[in-house]
Amino acid sequence: MSIVHSHAVAPRPAARLTVVARHARGLALLAALALAGCLGASDAVPEGRLAIEVAPLSLSGLTDATYTLTVRNGLDETVWTRTVTSTQYGDGAGAISYVGTCDAAAGAELNTIALVLDELRDASGALTSGVDYMNPAPATDPVELTRTCLADTDVAVDFDLTVARAAQQGFFDVAISFSDIFCAAKLDCEKADGTPLELLFHPDGGRALTAVVAFACTAGPGSDTTLWLDRVVVTCDGGGPFEVDVIAGPGNLDPPFADPAQDLFFQTAVYRGVEQLDGTTSWNKAYWNVALGLNEAAFTNLGACTLTTTATATDGTLFDGATPADTRWPTVTWNVEIISSTGARTCHTHALDDGTGVATTYTPTTGHTFYGTFSRATGLAGVAAASPDATSTIACTPDPIVGGDTGTCTVVPRSSGYVIDVDATAFSPSATAGAVGAISPASGTEFTFSFTAPLAAQTVTISSGFSDTTVDVTATCSDGVKNGDESDVDCGGSCADCANGDSCVVGGDCASSYCAAGTCAWAARCTALRDQSAPSGEYTIDVNGAGALHTVYCDMTTSGGGWTIFRNAEVGSVTGLTTSWHLDRQHVMAYINTSGTIAYTLLEQLTTYAATDLTVSHDGNSTRVHFVPGVTSGTLNGFRTNGTNLSFTNCDTNASSYFTFFKTGFSVTGSPYPLEQNWRASRITVAQAIPSTYFGNVNLAFGGCGSYTGNVGYTAALGLR
């Protein structure tokens, strides 16, 4: 092991960085280089050591490998650079060990480690990059990783390279013993004799021009050869793009072919499978071929067209179809012009790495995510990328569910109908009512989340973010449990009304129609019921809160609503109707019942006396509404009804100014007066079904010459609030 202390910049606190190259498996005959490291500075030396250790590459026949390692600090200053060989610093077969430094100074501690593969050699001498192998780390595009260099602290650095080396076998003729993956690829539009390849049947009849994208690999005996392929896409200057869903099929895909002047594909087909190389081993080869029926009638209109796709192979799987980060992964790319700008066919036989558009390439270190995958072991194709769509399924149990209970929803991620392996973050569960819990596990092909049903019975739509389902929420009113939209056990909400003392949320939960601070109780007046949205009708109220209950009619709509009307048999004898109960002393409501037709008149003081409250008194047999009293001769007297002043000039000092509403069996008759007639004429018919038991006799007494008239042909009732 060599110790190096040379440094290209002024000395700074440093650490030791260990870089290790390890074996990896890839395309063709694959070699791998991994750099893994530790950094730890000695207290006695201001600069630490960079220890580079390379594990065996396991490249058959390889006798040496040359690498250039460069470390730059966060100021883009070169810490050191060195060319090392496997024979000088390793096992002579690709492994190396080396020690250097990194820069841990403040502001410069983010170091970049660059790796260049300069040369590979075997017994015949130097191998030719681009012919014998494809270089994943040339000097023009080194593999770089950044790590924070910490003084006196070990720091791990891992490089993973995969070298794609040319195989000596033919396209579909791989049949030798090996442990790495061999692949072959091409694009064909011609037969061996140079005539057009005609494979797929044109709708007009007969076979027609066909292009075939071919890809085949094997990882050797007992392996799980898995192919990865992106969509085949043809982009044209005059139309498209035209795509083939490579996971569809197998067989004919029957793409739309409605416009022969513009549609490029008259037919497409996908073929996938496993070819047995011989009868004695398990060197089965997986193949994936895509055939494109090219509609020559559209060539001139479409102009220049280029076919593109990318493929790779593994022994096993890639999570979410993505190549590992910090890795340059070997791939095969197709980037072939198949039609010229003049509409001529330009595709022919394009072999791998012959310079005509089918080439061995490498992914960037950020990786590449493939669209489709095909496993030799299972014979199944599917979407590889983590891109769930509306074909993802969601189901929730139980359904129906009792309100307030918690169920479970299961999501199966799919793309184009194929189950895929994704992260849970791909989904965003939601519900139109109730609540959803967190989705788990973190990744996989099936996820669950909880759903807590809302209390009210309803149909809830639950979404995974890509697809929806519905769940019926129900509740039972006899299960002895507070659930659903119940406010108390088996009552309230959509169940029976709750008794006084039971819990409530709104007045509608209670038999009393009144919810007082979360508990069912009697209301003291109709305004309290009105404020909890109770409709017009008969109710029981407790006027003074002492349990003296009265059945009343509540008019909830007329002139603001909240009018309390006592039964005629109780007029004048209800206790507790104090000024603290009678909140609105600016208005009273007089209802007129004429042969069953109900009308109302809203009574107020004359505008002149509007600042004076009305006075309501009770004598046991009647209730009297007093207007401005104490009048003298020559003063204005009367009242206001439904917004109209009805007034007269008092002719004497008679202070009478009131309506008297009598209970059953009591009345006062009098002579007809215009004041009473005009009052009745002001009435407005109202759609209130007030029972006749609430109506009785009324008398208007106003001054010595205003009115002293009893009801004739009608009855009246008084509403207070």
Image (cartoon, rainbow, N blue to C red):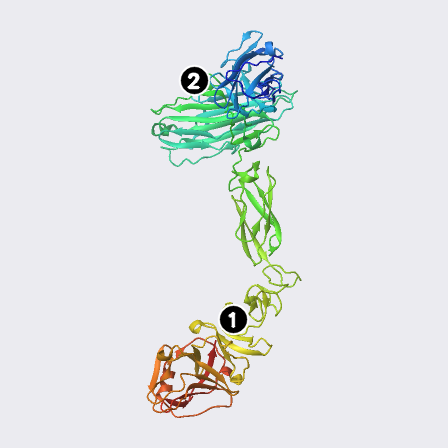
Q: Is residue 418 above or below residue 346?
A: below
Which label sits on residue 528?
1
Give residue 560's position: percent from left, percent from top: 44, 71
Q: Compare residues 662 and 229 and report the one nearer the observer.
A: 662
Circle 2: element type: loop
Crowding at dot 1, Cα within 10 Å, few <14 / some 14-19 / many 20+, comes out as: some
Seen from this angle, which residue lies furthest top? 124
* Quadrant of the snapshot with the N terminus: top right
Residue 245 image label: none
**x then y, percent, for residue 495:** 59, 64
Asked which quadrant contains residue 491, the reply is bottom right
Residue 597 showing in the rendered view = no
Kind of residue indicated by mark 1: Ala
Residue that sits furthest to the front in the current view:
44
The amino acid on which the numbered mark 2 sits, given as a three-letter code, is Gly
Q: Position of residue 89 (x, y in %)?
A: 60, 11
- Residue at image coords 34%, 24%: 341
| Alpha carbon distance from label 2 to label 1 | 96 Å
Whether residue 588 is situated above or below residue 248 in the rendered picture: below
Q: Is residue 16 depicted above or below 613 in this figure?
A: above
Q: Is residue 246 visible?
A: yes
Circle 2 packing at 10 Å, graded few (<14), some (14-19), many (20+), is few
x and y percent of residue 160 in the render? Answer: 57, 22
**Looking at the image, is mark 2 or mark 1 nearer the viewer?**
1
In which quarter of the view is residue 6 placed?
Answer: top right
Secondary structure at numbered mark 1: helix
Q: How many marks?
A: 2
Question: Contact, CB < 8 Å: mark 2 with mark 1?
Answer: no
- Name the disc covering residue 194, or none: 2
Front-lying residue, 602 or 307: 602
Q: Does label 2 or label 1 sit earlier along the sequence? A: 2
Q: Is residue 87 above or below residue 173?
A: above
